[in-house]
Amino acid sequence: MVIKGRAWVFGDDVSTDDIAPSVYLTQYLPPERLKEIAMEGIEPNFYKKFKAGDLMVAGANFGCGSSREEAPMALKTLGVAAVIAESFGRIFYRNAINVGLAAVACPGISEQVKTGDSITVNIETGEVVIEKTGMRLKGEEKPQFLLDILRKGGLLEHLRQTVL
């Protein structure tokens, strides 16, 4: 579970309303439309700039705010390969894993990476390598049960394959 991609960097306290603004969520949006609202609260039309397979890097408390599952789902449908942040809002973190979006807490990441940098992240070990400098940062290791959920594409698929 090693992912290499271009980084898009955001600051501290990016809320679920920044990621998937509630104004769009008064009615059901199919997943393909969710990608169009991703990060709309910070950068309008972000989906037009972002390329599937890119990575998001953020400061502390990424995904704070409400428990809306649409926020990590919007990032996943946009094609975000992983989100690497100093820390996460707890509900967002688990919702991300549950929808199959890799989220890695890595202290110091936001100070070392700039938008456009190429980085590699090992989802299992939490190690992040910044390609231009060769710097290695140590993020959190994932417990096996969360890795199992991610490998299967999310909690629902994990349950389908292991329980049903």
Image: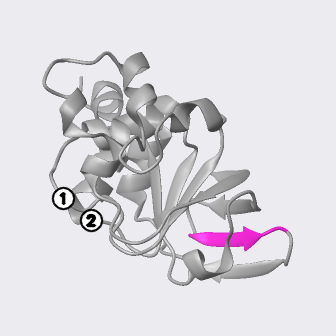
Q: Secondary structure at mark 2?
A: loop
Residue 3: percent from the left, percent from the top? 68, 51
Report the magenta residues as a range: 126-131
Q: Is residue 9 left or right of residue 115?
A: left
**Snapshot colouring:** one colour
Is residue 134 depicted above or below 85 in this figure?
below
- What residue is rendered at 30% in x and 25% in y? 160
- What residue is rendered at 42% in x and 38% in y? 38
Residue 147: percent from the left, percent from the top? 45, 53
Q: Is residue 5 left or right of residue 35?
A: right
Res 71 → quadrant: top left
- Identify residue type, mark 1: Gly
For the C terminus, which image quadrant? top left
Residue annotated with mark 1 = 65
- What residue is rendered at 72% in x and 61% in y? 120
Of all residues shown, which one is farthest toward the front?
44
Is residue 138 depicted above or below 30 in this figure?
below
- Neighbor class of circle 1 (other Cα within 10 Å; few <14, some 14-19, many 20+) is some
Work out whether mark 2 precedes mark 1 in sequence or the reverse, and give the earlier one: 1
Residue 75: percent from the left, percent from the top? 44, 40
Which is closer to the viewer, label 2 or label 1?
1
- Identify residue type, mark 2: Gly
Residue annotated with mark 2 = 89
Residue 13 among magenta residues: no
Tell me the distance, in whole angstroms, between the alpha carbons under discs 2 and 1. Answer: 7 Å
In contact (CB < 8 Å): disc 2 and disc 1: yes
Residue 29: percent from the left, percent from the top? 27, 18
Is residue 28 depicted above or below 143 in this figure?
above
**Residue sitting nearer the eye, 12 or 85:** 12
Q: Which mark is residue 143?
A: none
- What residue is rendered at 73% in x and 52% in y? 4
Main SS, magenta region, reads strand
